[in-house]
Structure formats: structure tokens, C-alpha cells
Image (cartoon, grey):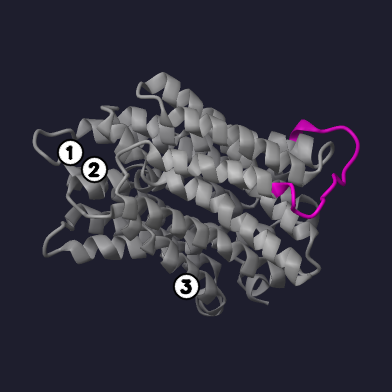
Amino acid sequence: MPTAVRLKLSVMMFLEYFVWGAWYVTMGTWLGSLGFSGEQIGLTYGTTALAAMISPFFVGMFADRFFATERLLSVLHLLGGGALFYASTRSTFWPLYTAVLVHTLFYMPTLALTNSLSFRQMKDPKREFPPVRVLGTIGWIAAGLIVGTLGVEATGKPMQLAAAGAVALAAYCLVLPHTPPQMTGRVRFRDVLGLDALQLMKDRSFAIFVLGSFLVCIPLQFYYAFANPFLNAIGVTNAAGKMTMGQMSELVFLLLMPWFFKRLGVKQMLLVGMGAWVTRYILFAYGNNEALVWMLYLGILLHGICYDFFFVTGQIYVDQKAPPTVRAAAQGFITFVTYGVGMLIGSWLSGRIVDAYVVAGEVGHDWQSIWLAPAAMATAVLVLFALFFKSDATAEVVR
């Protein structure tokens, strides 16, 4: 791949995840300052899950068959940026929720589109894609550091920053390499949803993997929706900036994953990832902003293990388990189950539990009880996995 193309793709990835990282982490803190309930905050975070369930239609029906990818990306980011800016000016639930939902419906398809556009320009994606994709994580980190440094976490400014980034990315997409559609013919509903992958559910271990992935995504949403409000409530300064330590650890563990695969294998990697989520929530439950502040920092730093060992390992397991003819369908199916249905339920449930533990005082919530709830859920899934999941794909993954 020519250096000029690699640079263009790297900037694209930086801006792509800058947009998401600028508003997603701190939205819960802002919504709380507007007087939104925990359930309302959870539901607003659930918009990404709703969009993740719908976005395959955009990718399967438009980019693959009708429009050049870079032009579709430009339109989606422009419309999404406008919706996000409108959301930043709202202060009541339904108008703000609707605007965020519109934004996520435009944004979530771009995650797959930026990947597919990149792959089309590469001769060896396995070697060339990681150095390009890593700029996305750096973009997320940069957004968090900017928001934290400016001290605007409890305002709509992060959404406005993200909206500006989306508009800039919309313009930038027009200079990306031309990537015309490759497919023709009618669109089958089962292809879009990955229903052909259901045949894999006949395998007991794969079925346990899907069930466990779905269940574990429910407690996972507690972190995404309420970690920043929690840290701000207990007085942690520059919480958004400090939370980027999680993405920094993600970079490190992503590089170390081949080493861990050779020594642990798929099942142990998944168990370690789930165990890290349990540990993170326990650390949050018993940590504080005084002598035990190290527990909070350690909980944030565990993000690399939480994300890479579970999600990335899971994606590799699915790729190796599925026959070549249904690999794309299998990835679409597991995304629908986890990022879609699992996190949608988690968004609603996390909000209900946060509302159930409202207390009088400056902190406003019984955060220890709140964090112990997802810790218990994740522990139950961990036990399920340990007892019933068997992996026969270790040799294939590390070959």
C-alpha cells in the first residue's frame, strides 16, 4: 500500500474514533447535570445498541451495491454531525434522546464502512490494517484528553466538539481513495442479518459462546454509561482524561495478544477477559478518591484486558470456528447479539439499578451497591463459561 494512501486511511481512523470518543464517555455526566434519571441516561446510551442492530442494513444494502463507500461515509458523517450538534442544544429527554438516536443511526454504520474501505486498499490486511486502525484508538484518547483538559464534561460542549469533528471528517472523506460498490443482485434479508450463521448454534460450545457473550454484554454497559458520572460524583478531577488510560492499556494488550494466545488459548483468554470485568467492578465498588484511589485507576487500566481479551478474542474465535462461506454472516450475527441486543438490555437495566440506589448527599448514589450488581452478573457468566464452554480452535487461532 502506498505511503500516501496509508496516511489518508490513518487520518480517517483518527477522526472516526475522535468523534465517538469526544461525546460518548462524558454524556452521562452531562445528562445527570440536566436532571435526567439513571434510566433516562441508560436509555440514551442504548441508542448505540439500537443503531448497531440496524446498521447492517446500511452496509448490506447501500455501500455494497449502490454507492461508493467514501461518498456514503461523507453523507453519513455530515448528517450525523448535524444531529449531534442539535442534541447538544437540548435539555429535555425526548428531543435529546431522539437527536442522539438519529446521530447513532448515521454513525454506527461508518465503523464497518471505514474498515471495509481500508481493506479494499490493502494487499495484506492482516499486516497493513493494525497500524492504520491503531490511529482510531489514539483519536479516542485525544478526544478524552481535550474534553478533560477543558473541564467541560458536565456540558454539551463535548457533543459540539464531536459534531465539528464529524463535519471535518465528512469533508475529508471526499479525498479518500475512490471505493465503488462491488456487489450486484438482490439483497436477501438473511444475508443482512447473518442468519446463515445460525447453523453454527448446533455446536454446543459455540452456542454457549453466543449465550455468554450476550449475557456478559448486559453488565458491561454499566461501565460505558456510568463510569464517568461515578468518577465525577466522588470528586476525581479530569475524569475524562484519566479514563483514556483505559484506551492506552488497550493499545498495549492488543500488541501482546499473540503472546497470550500461545500460552492461554481461546477459552482462557475469554475467561481472563470476563474476570477482568468482575475485578474492575469490585475495584470501583470499594475504591475511593482518597487512600484507595489506586483501585479506581487500576479499574480503568483493566480496560485493555476487558476489551481485547473478550471482544477481540471472541471475533477471532468466530472467524476460526465459522466455515469460509458464513464467516461474514457469523461476525454480523455476533455483533447483532452483543453490541445490539445485549448492550441494549444492559443500557436499560443499568439505568434502573442506578435509580434504585439514589441516596441523599453530595455523591447522590450508593455507588458501592451499584457496582456490585454488574460484578455479580459478570461472575455468573464467568462460571457459566468455565463449566460449559470448550474451545477446539486454539491451534487454529495461533497458527
Q: Quick one: which residue is furthest to the right in this view?
A: 185
Q: Main secondary structure of the magenta part?
A: loop
Q: Is residue 201 visible?
A: no
Q: Is residue 67 left or right of residue 42?
A: right
Q: Secondary structure at mark 1?
A: loop
Tag in front: 2 or 3? 3
Pointer 3 or 1: first along the chain? 3
Q: Secondary structure at mark 3?
A: helix
Tag in front: 1 or 2? 1
Residue tagged 1 = 365
At horizontal 32% and vertical 60% (from top left) the residue drawn is: 242
Residue 17: where, in percent of width, then height?
Answer: 54, 52
Badge 1, how many Cα within 10 Å: few under 14, some, many 20+? Answer: some
Q: Quadrant of residue 102?
A: top right
At horizontal 33% and vertical 37% (from top left) the residue drawn is: 155
Q: CA distance from mark 1 to mark 2?
A: 8 Å
Between residues 138 and 66, which one lies in front from this camera angle? 138
Q: What amino acid type is highlighted by mark number 1?
A: His
Badge 3, how many Cα within 10 Å: few under 14, some, many 20+? Answer: few
Between residues 18 and 188, which one lies in front from this camera angle? 18
At horizontal 26% and vertical 27% (from top left) the residue drawn is: 35
Residues at marks 1 and 2 touching, judged by CB atoms closer than 8 Å = yes
Q: Point out which mark residue 252 bears.
A: 3
Q: CA distance from mark 3 to mark 1?
A: 34 Å
At horizontal 58% and vertical 49% (from top left) the residue drawn is: 207
Residue 190: where, in percent of width, then height?
Answer: 75, 35
Quarter holding the N terminus is bottom right
Q: Is residue 137 left or right of residue 116?
A: left
